[in-house]
Image: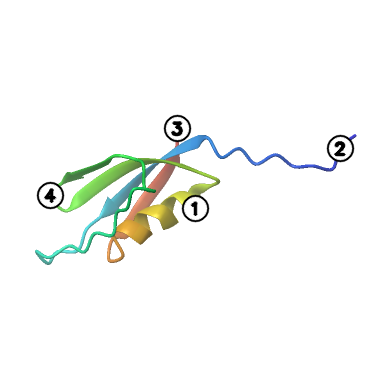
Amino acid sequence: MSNVIDFHSDVEYKVLFNLPKSKVVHICKTADDDFDIHLEGQHGSAVVRGLGKTGASNRIQKIFPTCEIVDVLKI
């Protein structure tokens, strides 16, 4: 019997978000953010690897600090 819990970091989540209505959007994407972001108007989505829904949404909030997270779906 083992007391070790294995948290898989290779789980993918699709994060849906809304951008602010103003025309200026602040983006903080770096080389460490190795995922694609799709934007259409004020709506966006990204497929992110993470440890959970909160971690995935936090990665998007880091890139778009003023965005509103709509939903996080496990893929």
The answer to whether 52 appears left or right of 36 in the picture is: right
Find the distance from the CA under tag 3 to the CA under tag 1: 15 Å
Residue type marked 2: Ser
Q: Earlier in the sequence, mark 3 or mark 1?
A: 1
Q: Helix, strand or loop at disc 1?
A: helix
In the picture of the structure, the residue carrying the numbered disc 4 is 41
Residue type marked 3: Ile
Find the distance from the CA under tag 1 to the CA under tag 2: 26 Å
Crowdedness of circle 4 by 10 Å Cα count: few (<14), some, many (20+)?
few
Q: Helix, strand or loop at disc 4?
A: loop
Q: Earlier in the sequence, mark 3 or mark 4?
A: 4
In the picture of the structure, the residue carrying the numbered disc 3 is 75
Task: Name the one closer to the observer, 43 or 32.
Answer: 32
In the picture of the structure, the residue carrying the numbered disc 2 is 2
Q: Nearer the viewer, mark 4 or mark 1?
A: 1
Q: Helix, strand or loop at disc 2?
A: loop
Find the distance from the CA under tag 2 to the CA under tag 4: 49 Å
Residue at point 16% right, 53% down? 42
Task: Name the one closer to the observer, 49 or 72.
Answer: 49
